[in-house]
Image: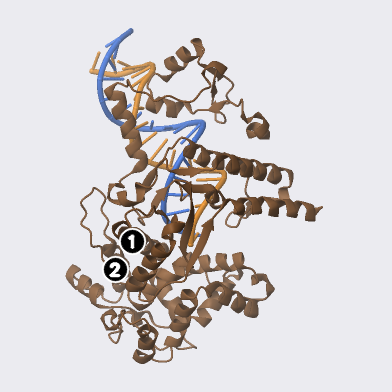
Chain colours: A brown, B orange, C blue
Amino acid sequence: MSKQFNKDRFEDEYVPLHSGKLQDVIGDYKACIEYLEKSGVVVVNPQYIVGEQCKGYKFTDEYQTTAAPFINLKQQFRNKLKRHEIARNGYTEHLNYITKWLNSDLQLNHNLVDEWINYNHDVKTTFPDLRDYNHIKQKYKCPEEQYKFSKLVAQRFKNNDFTHGQDQNVYRLHTNLTNMPSMMRNALTYKGQPLVSIDISNSHPYSAILLLINSFRLKRTNKPKTALQIDFGKKVQETIASFKQENKPSTTSQQNLLDACTNNSFPFKEADNSSEIDINSINNEDRLNIKDIKVKDKGSYIMLLKQSVSPINSEIERYIKLVTTGKFYEYLMQLFTTELGEGFNDRTTVKIEVLKLFFTANGFLHQPDAAAKKVFKKHFPTVYKIFSAIKKNDKADLPKLLQSIESYLILDVIAKRIARELPHAPIFTIHDSIATTIEYQDAVKKIMSEELESKIGIAPHLKVEYWQESNIHKNMQDLKNKISNAG
DNA sequence: CAAGCGACGAGCGAAGCTAA
DNA sequence: TTAGCTTCGCTCGTCGCTTG
């Protein structure tokens, strides 16, 4: 039964269709299926298990041909299909300059992808030790499920079934590319051209720089013409307000709050290595104002930190340097290894620890699992203090803030400028990265670097990744080597 | 006037996956 | 840890209709 999706049987396999979903689209679907079956168009596999498996369908040999488009649809049915499409795609009209590139020119090498999917499935079912691991659930991933998921993603490309929606919480744009297994992206081409993606190295720690120097520089400039209400500035303000209220619970009017938010930034208080930094320091009047930072001058940023406040800034300066040179993980790996031992001498472990650092509640600090977080706190006390202040009321505030910043910069600032200046450059955003064709690689990279420097204050480290089929072959070869090594 | 029924949509929880 | 996505099976309430 685990071989339900075995590749040998795939050719003549029944396609499972959930009756409830069919019913959503066609009311009396049962009559339709019966008709199709009687006319010899489809064959139904009537076997289904309540609560587990739905009925399967396939075309008869005679009708197993290429699809022809429908033309004579009733208007009502057409409207209904349209409603379904809108429900799937959400409000993305205002992001048309990105979503328009999701079209039939974006092609997937299906032969190669199928080979990769099948090979992975076979290897990982035969050799359980080679399965992928889910660190959060602390268990191995199920090859059967991964197979199904990958097949689905590929099938949607085959059908040119492109969907896109912007989530209303952190404003990320979800497309066929964002939830595609990253290895499969190597088989993508646009009009036959290979693609290249430009990623912001450690993007969460990078966008957090904004919070370390000033939370309020970002403002939405485009008017909310569409039904989508994006108020990025408000998001930031609400979060800041949530921990400001503690100090001034009495009469903080909305306007005062707004003024405070637009004028103030986080303070740089002198670090006290023995005691906690007081939460009141957030409201310290002696603070650095973003207006004082001359972002035009590339060299001035670090300088300014040194000038304006005390030795403590060396800590924030160190953080910023590490993040913007792409050395953050390497540094932490070394730090954790020195303080905690060899268990942290591994990049993925460090990555997970960084995720914990950013996203866990403040209470998560004294148990053994939080050892690395504690080390970070010791070496970056001010950075830690600011993060924990934001997480004080709700630990989700920091990730929300950072992801909102990310989305805003990528979608509204960078992609928009690319669309304006390079109207023929195909672009595909994947949360913290932008993919384009080789032709536009340098120009896109330049725009990303410039815009990020202008908005955050310092340019990030940008990582260039070529999507090429050889990566998939290499991945399969690596698996082969692992098998032969294991014996 | 209720009761019943099919259609249908919303919403839930569970599983899987992705990104960070 | 966070934020999403899909799929499936399920419950529940509403609507419009028919039936008793």
Q: Are marks 1 and 2 in contact (CB under 8 Å)?
A: yes
- Looking at the rendered image, the quarter that the N terminus of chain A falls into is top right
Tell me which numbered mark, 1 or 2, is placed earlier along the sequence.
2
Residue A27 seen in the current view:
yes
Residue C14 % position (x, y): 28, 29
Work out whether residue A358 or residue A242 is closer to the camera in this orientation and state it: A358
Residue A131, placed above or below residue A234: above
Q: Which residue is mark 2?
A: A218
Instruction: Count neighbours of disc 2 (C-alpha within 10 A) and say few if under 14, some if 14 to 19, many if 20 or more.
Output: some
Chain label for disc 2: A
Q: Is A401 displayed left or right of A41 in the figure?
A: left
Residue A251 seen in the current view:
no
Q: Identity of the amino acid at label 2?
A: Leu
Q: Is A231 displayed left or right of A472 in the figure?
A: left
Residue A141 % position (x, y): 62, 48
Residue A65 % position (x, y): 51, 23
Residue A40, placed above or below residue A302: above
Residue A408, numbered circle: 1
When asked about the image quadrant of residue A348, the answer is: bottom right
When asked about the image quadrant of residue A276, the answer is: bottom left
Work out whether residue A27 or residue A242 is closer to the camera in this orientation and state it: A27
Q: Is A463 displayed left or right of A295 in the figure?
A: right
Task: Name the residue: 50% across, 64% down.
Answer: A464
Residue A244, placed above or below residue A79: below
Instruction: Count neighbours of disc 1 (C-alpha within 10 A) and say few if under 14, some if 14 to 19, many if 20 or more.
Output: many
Task: Name the residue: 64% across, 40% down.
Answer: A118
Task: Name the residue: 54% across, 51% down.
Answer: A186
Task: Name the residue: 59% across, 39% down.
Answer: A111
SS of the residue under disc 1: helix
Residue A26, placed above or below residue A408: above
When asked about the image quadrant of residue A262, the answer is: bottom left
Chain label for disc 1: A
